[in-house]
Amino acid sequence: MRAKRILFSLVIGLSMATNGQVTSFNFDNDTQKDWSFSFTPYALLAAQSTDVGEESIRQSFDDLASLTNAGFQFVASLRYQRYSLSVDGTFATLGVNERQGPASIDLEVKQSIMDVSAGYVIFSTFIDNTDNIAKGWSIEGTLGAKNWVNDLTIDFKIELEQLENDFIIRTNENQSWWDLMLGVRTNVSLSDKVFLGARLSVGGFGIGNSSDFSYDFVYLNVFKVLNYMTINAGFRNFNYQRTDDGVDTSVNVIGPLLGLSFFI
């Protein structure tokens, strides 16, 4: 059972690196509206390290990209004055097929990550029109929850001419949990077209089936190309640590990210 849990944790930890959360930043100039909505498709070009018990995996972005069959990541954010609500979704299918002689192993991971958070702007020169060195600056506190769902299927197949049908052994494992996440976000406007943003959230805290501890850090450079569109380029690092059936798992993901935000 322990060996099976280690294998499952290694595979799931590996797949985490192709996914995850990024934050969209609602940057408006002096004419900021009461209501705004943004939609941001993005990609995380990450490398990862996974430690499960005494086993370790280190993978580059190219290694991870070769495992990804399909995937989509987005952030949708609704803001009203000082209040905000955002949903960060990741949906991906990863897999690998290895064959040697009549035997083959087909591995598939279906993964979804849904992060819902509410925020409140504690301080903002965008709203209060307070004089500041930068053109605009804000600090926002966030509270939310992140749901991880991983469905692993492994098919072991033997094809022999003397067998009327293929010999197949299928193993299926499902893992899911929620992490409470507390965070702070800051946005800085350097000009009408150049913005900086950063967010740090921490969570898990070993509540129920959640991670023992997790954190998520995002830094973004945002360039306004149209009144309704920005180009986002930055950096992201997230980590989680948890224990399942006595097996300690630690996953660390780090790398650049790219995205487009559309505003209405």
Image (spheres, helix red, strand yellow):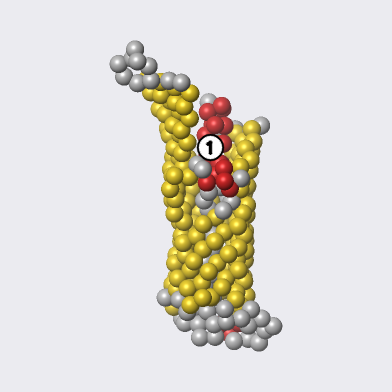
* Mark 1 element type: helix
Q: Decide which of 45, 16 is in the foreground and name it.
A: 45
Residue closest to the far left = 164
Residue 176, position in %: x, y?
47, 43
Residue 163, position in %: x, y?
33, 14
Q: Is residue 55 above or below residue 40?
A: above
Q: Residue at x 44, y 50 (%)?
A: 71
Q: Is residue 181 visible?
A: yes
Residue 179, position in %: x, y?
53, 51
Q: Decide which of 177, 105 is in the foreground and name it.
A: 105
Residue closest to the far top = 162
Residue 23, position in %: x, y?
54, 63
Q: Residue at x 60, y 63 (%)?
A: 234
Mark 1 crowd level (few <14, some 14–19, many ≥20, 10 Å Cα): many
Q: Quadrant of residue 170?
A: top left
Q: Residue at x 52, y 46 (%)?
A: 65
Q: Decide which of 151, 119 is in the foreground and name it.
A: 151
| Left-right relation of 243 to 156 | right
Residue wearing tag 1: 11
Q: Residue at x 54, y 61 (%)?
A: 258
Q: Is residue 26 above or below residue 92?
A: below
Q: Is residue 85 visible?
A: no
| Left-right relation of 115 to 58 | left
Residue type at mark 1 is Val
Q: Is residue 4 above or below residue 195?
A: above
Residue closest to the far right = 133
Q: Is residue 149 above or below residue 4?
A: below
- Check the picture and name the quadrant holding the C terminus: bottom left
Q: How many marks?
A: 1
Q: Decide which of 23, 231 is in the foreground and name it.
A: 231
